[in-house]
Amino acid sequence: MRIEARENVSWLAKLAAPAVAAIIAMAVCAILILWTGASPVEAYSLLFSGALGSKFAVSETLTRATPLIFTGLAAALAFRAKLWNIGAEGQLYLGACMATWLGTGMFDLPALVMVPLLFLAGALAGGVLLLGPTLLKTKLGVDEVVTTLLLNFIVILFVNWLVFGPWKDPMAMGWPQAAPVIDSAVLGQILSKTRLHWGFAIALFFAILSWVLVRFTSWGYEIRAVGLNQHASRFAGIPVDKVVVRTALISGGLAGFAGVSELCGLRGYLTLDLSPGFGYSGIVVAMLAALHPLGVVLSALFVAVISIGADSMSRSLNISNYISEVATAISLLAVLASMFFSHYKIRWR
Amino acid sequence: MDILTLLFETGFWIAIVRMATPLIFGTLGELICERAGVLNLGIEGIMAAGCMSGWMWVYLGGDLWTGVLFAAFIGAVFGLLHALFTVYWGLSQHVTGLGITMLASALSSFVFRMMLPKATTPPKIVPFQPLDIPVLSDIPFVGEVLFSQSPLTLLALVTIVLVSYIIYRTPLGLALCMTGENPMAVESQGLSVFAIRTCAVMIGSALMAVGGAFLTLSAFDAYYIGMVNGRGWICIALVVFSSWKPGKALLGAMLFAAFDALQMRVQQQSVSIVPYQFYLMMPYIFSIVALIVMSRKASYPKALLIPFRHGER
């Protein structure tokens, strides 16, 4: 058996890779659904009508896609520079902490100043959290995968302490949650009678901004160069460490945005279930998009459809909604495999 | 002070050895993978899968030892999947490993929920009982700390000796380490890099799953979702800490478990001074510190993370 690189990969094959991955993921999950005794056809029609079947369902799906776009962008930019930021979950929570700290009555400003300020502060918190592992990587050669992963656990315990301890809202009937953000810090609804908030529009804006950054600016060029070949970049005079640190600040900042947007747009107050693993799903979103910032929007929508749809499907068919996590994980592995087959061929001898 | 008296307390040492057991299995498993040049970030999920599958086997009427074997088998299957992606197709070991972790954890939760849909409190099984070996278990202190443990703990200690022996004293171990250092040289000796790496990842993953199974079959008697709780990631830090040496892996796991046991004792004694969440953070902070300290002089296997392809240099 011999693996050979394909000479030229058509753009069609590149586009087909994520689509094939999505189909494989759904086929494998169909087998799991069969095992539970339900009909896959019925399950999938319930899933899609649950996620896209009505105006409200679509608004829920877009709401779910919002944090996934932010964490997906965070992963996509970092992975482009071969910086393995697996800590988006922690960065998201620290961003939300920062917004809670500043946005629950420390001061009051008009909403047009307050909201950008909170986003900026949340991004700063996320960026700084990723800065530590990044400096350890560039200065001491400590693997950033493990440090960012372990920081997730530390940050979540920190939030646990905050919402059970000093920040516990006495008005919350004993629930472990912080005080709600003040009115001027709330992101309004885009559509009335839905939960879809302006965070979605902000996420789209930053997806476009990230695309411009990666595609058209010298910063983006440096990020891509460092990711492709560090040695060659260094030889060409690119300050590799500086580029990696800059990318880390941007990536951590985007993950921090996810936390602020969920806090100010959806929940209103800090809790321990602010994110059901958006940081980790962001990795899947980024990979499904082949690290393309605009593709991130599409793949975030796909993951959101699966997760919102699985919620309503699981209620009517008694299938555990962990099926959506299984589907997400399989689509990650499947997209890796289909990218491989679009770039290489196997020759049997 | 209190800590000094604690060091002479047999119960404290028993706790350390017990708490080190899953870490020993996990660290050895990861060490074998990395020695062959493959980083296995699937460890966290594979431990969860071992945890759930071993427990489910026993819950459905199997006996404990076949439960351990079944967990190991499930681990090896996920290892094979990881090897297919990273060894044969040469895909990113980071992303594949995270994918395996996501898949294995999600599948474990899904299967558990589907098999026991109505369980509100986690059902229980009868776990491994502490050994009572004649003579050995009666030795004061040593007998209690080493030989009155769960049989899986003893198995962990035997595995360390076995893995050390294989790595340092047999041609098989030489081939394993050479695959992680210089795969071209292995191939020129007529050995298959693909085969060695695949076997290493499968065996390593089986050990990780056994580490997970220890949690449900010995340390506790029930399974709940999220019970591995970062132990897999800690094992990855411990491999760096141990400089890829099995003996030092034991030392690292023991040191880590001692630290964990200590924080639990301190937590019980001083209620109000420091919130308990900060004690729970300690293991993770300790892992990061251990990584920083050891990374300075760490000598990674040279071919770690680098896929091998025939005819490519």
Image: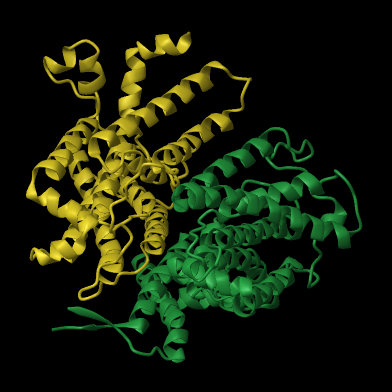
Give the camera-side residue of A333 and A176.
Answer: A333
Measuring from the top left, give residue A294's x and y in whole percent.
60, 78
Nearest to the observer: residue B171 or residue B129: B171
The total of numbered circles placed on residues is 0
Residue at x 71%, y 36% (from the top left corner): A174
Q: In this view, does B30 lie above or below B102?
A: above
Q: In which quarter of the image is residue B165?
A: top left
Chain that appears yellow? B
Q: In the image, which lettered chain appears green? A: A
Across and down, in percent, residue B96 comes to 37, 63
Name the image quarter holding the C terminus of chain B: bottom left
Q: Position of residue B8 (x, y in %)?
A: 35, 10
Query: Viewed as shown, does residue A218 lie left or right of A84?
Result: right
Residue B10 placement (x, y as % from top left): 32, 14
Residue A309 visible within the image = no
Q: In this view, does A254 lie to the left or right of B244?
A: right
Q: Residue A266 is drawn in which quadrant?
A: bottom right
Residue at the (87%, 56%) spot, across then down: A184
The image shows residue A5, relative to residue B202, as above or below, that is below
